[in-house]
Amino acid sequence: MDGINSLLDSVKRFIWQDDLGKLRGFRALLIRTLRMIYAVARELITGQLNLRAMSLVYTTLLSFVPLLAVSFSVLKGFGVHNQIEPLLMNFLEPLGARGAEITRNIIGFVENVKVGVLGSVGLFLLIYTVISLLQKIESAFNYVWHVDRLRTFSQRFSNYLSVILIGPVLVFSALGITASASSHEFVEYLRSVEPFGTLIVQISKLGPYMLVWLAFSFIYIFIPNTSVKPVSALIGGLVAGVMWQSTGWAFASFIASSSKYTAIYTSFAILILLLIWLYLSWLILLVGAQVAYYVQYPQRMALKRQRLTLSNRLREQLALQLMHMIARNHYHSKPPWTLEAMAQYLQLPMEPVHRVLRYLEQAGFLVQVQAEQPAYLPAGDIGQTRIADIIGAIQHAGEEPPLMADHIPSSSPVEALCARLQKAREDALGDDSVKSMIIAEEQLSEKK
């Protein structure tokens, strides 16, 4: 046992002892890869990704048929609705013959959903069920990206419906164009000429894998309520795509080589296999999102999971820094700072930055001027906004019954000491305002 612990300590030292910013070449790539594997494995061990994957399985079972029904209705207008069945069968291919049976049943349910007979209330509930599924997916991805802010209802309605209605049309149109191009006379001529013929055959074999890769990458860019770099999404999509295909092969081999599950579970076997495959698919998708997150923010990879909490001192400092940045742009008539821009400038996750901004907004110091990309302006005259009031509001932020300062029994000496601390802060800061910080900064820059 001591030998195993010693080996683990040696591996940890090898992975984490070096400063990644000072490494170059192959060693930097190796250390970065090992750190990412360690960090992703730690996230899996903590169980949060597993819980969200299981939650998405339940939501998928409720919303999958309505989602396909809406897409089916749209695709039927373009005459490409018959493409849904092959695509669904490809997704359920690891289930073997059971996958084909499930596909036929789902398509039967979808064809029986007559949108025209549902009525306005039924149609609204159908669309609401689909939007709820996408909202649940967004919440899971926001957890990975440390974002505590969902899209507004209007954003969810417009963005999600655009993907549900337009996305399938674009996907199947692209597949149709690809099929037409592959049957073109010029392509047929190239097939007869080597090495182009072999190259075209190999590319056609890689087509499904490329489609899965691009689909996962698109999900990583669109779903999280934050800005995801395309390179990060592509790397995460590649990792998730490889894992998904490999897991599909392993799952199909397990089903083909095992005949006992049918005898044990009888008619429930098909449902249990479907649940397991949905769970694995969602878990792989979330793992790929975690990889994309660490690719975009490699500094967030650490030996121990980082708790994104702020001490009182850091919360006060961050509040003053955010007020200073927002007021300075407003004072110089520059575009307002957005949430994402401030988080990137400060090299901080969006979650704590948004939390402090919310405290300042609730206290009446800031006002949000954009919904899609939240931007902030001072709520009042920055010359009248006292720094002492900002610090006082941040100190009181988060106090709700029954955890409030007034509800804590305290003796007279404690109350006197707290009053002295507050008076000392008032005397030290006086009437210093946010505007005075900007003027002091400009005076310093002029002296330099």
Image (spheres, helix red, strand yellow):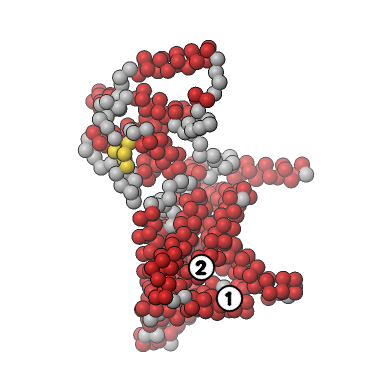
Q: Quadrant of residue 172?
A: bottom left
Residue 149 picture location, percent across and down: 43, 47
Assign a secondary structure to mark 1.
helix
Q: Which residue is mark 2?
A: 64
Q: Amino acid at mark 2?
A: Phe
Assign a secondary structure to mark 2.
helix
- Res 382 seen here: yes
Q: Which residue is mark 1?
A: 102
Residue 15 picture location, percent across and down: 59, 45
Residue 155 position (above or below residue 346): below
For label 1, count other residues whose C-alpha is less than 10 Å away and answer few (under 14), some (14-19) or many (20+).
some
Residue 280 picture location, percent across and down: 59, 63
Disc on res. 335 = none
Q: Quadrant of residue 276?
A: bottom right
Extreme-right residue of the structure: 1
Residues 68 and 185: in front is 68
Residue at 60 percent across and 55 percent down: it is 50
Count of all numbered marks drawn on residues in the image: 2
Is the residue under label 2 in contact with that under label 1 (CB below 8 Å)? no
Residue 386 picture location, percent across and down: 32, 24
Image quadrant in which the C terminus is located:
top left
Residue 154 position (above or below residue 326): below
For label 2, count other residues whose C-alpha is less than 10 Å away and answer few (under 14), some (14-19) or many (20+).
some
Residue 175 position (above or below residue 163): below
Residue at 44 percent across and 28 percent down: it is 396
Residue at 40 percent across and 71 percent down: it is 119
